[in-house]
Image (tube, rainbow, N blue to C red):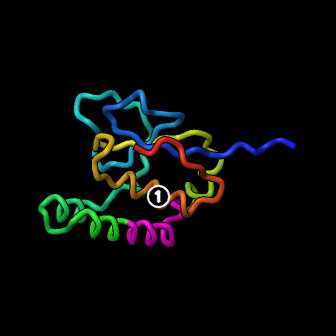
Amino acid sequence: MTKEAQAVLHTASFYAADDWHGVRYRVSRSHPRGRKTQWETLPFLYPPRELLEVYRAGMLDFSAFSGEYVSGLEEGKRSSTEFQDWLQAAPSLGEFTLLCFERAGENCHRLVLAEWLLEQVPGLSRGSIR
């Protein structure tokens, strides 16, 4: 009996290329200055600009930010065909990495996103979550 190949989800910072695996997806609203594009974009996974502004202004702690971000993901999952299509295709992606700015060990929406995706997508397994 052969084991079916599964998709493996990794997360990493733009600044840690050694941590990138497989297809790379930018899940941040902006592109790092001075960096050549080496990834695909997934705008439906970006945190809303307004949510980022409120968080950066110190009006939300990371826990509240995370809750709002997950609520937005849930809404996007229900309302966006592009988002639904990507979620359905995710189990066949092989290895892939979600990228944004925060360095490993810092609070970051990509970690929240990774945990949410691991709960939502059957056939998706945990890789290096940084």
Tell me residue 14's x, y (percent): 33, 36
97 relative to 84, above or below: above
Q: Nearer the viewer, residue 101 or 3?
A: 3
- The crowd level at tag 1 (other Cα within 10 Å; few <14, some 14-19, many 20+) is some
| Label 1 sits on residue | 115
Quarter of the image for residue 16 reads: top left
Q: Amino acid at mark 1?
A: Glu
Identified at 61% across, 44% down, the residue is 93
Q: Is residue 5 left or right of residue 95?
A: right
Residue 81 covered by magenta stretch: yes
Q: Is residue 42 left or right of residue 124?
A: left
Element class at badge 1: helix
Tell me residue 26's x, y (percent): 39, 43
Identified at 24% across, 65% down, the residue is 51
Q: Which residues are magenta?
A: 70-83
Image quarter (top left, top right, bottom left or bottom right) of the C terminus: top left
Kindly report the secondary structure that dominates the magenta region of the rendered protein. helix
Q: Is residue 28 visible?
A: yes
Identified at 42% across, 57% down, the residue is 113
Identified at 62% across, 40% down, the residue is 94
96 relative to 116, above or below: above
Quarter of the image for residue 102 reads: top left
Quarter of the image for residue 55 reads: bottom left
Tell me residue 44's x, y (percent): 42, 57
Q: Is residue 109 left or right of residue 126?
A: left
Q: Is residue 127 left or right of residue 122?
A: left
Residue 122 covered by magenta stretch: no
Q: Is residue 98 visible?
A: no
Furthest-left residue in this view: 57
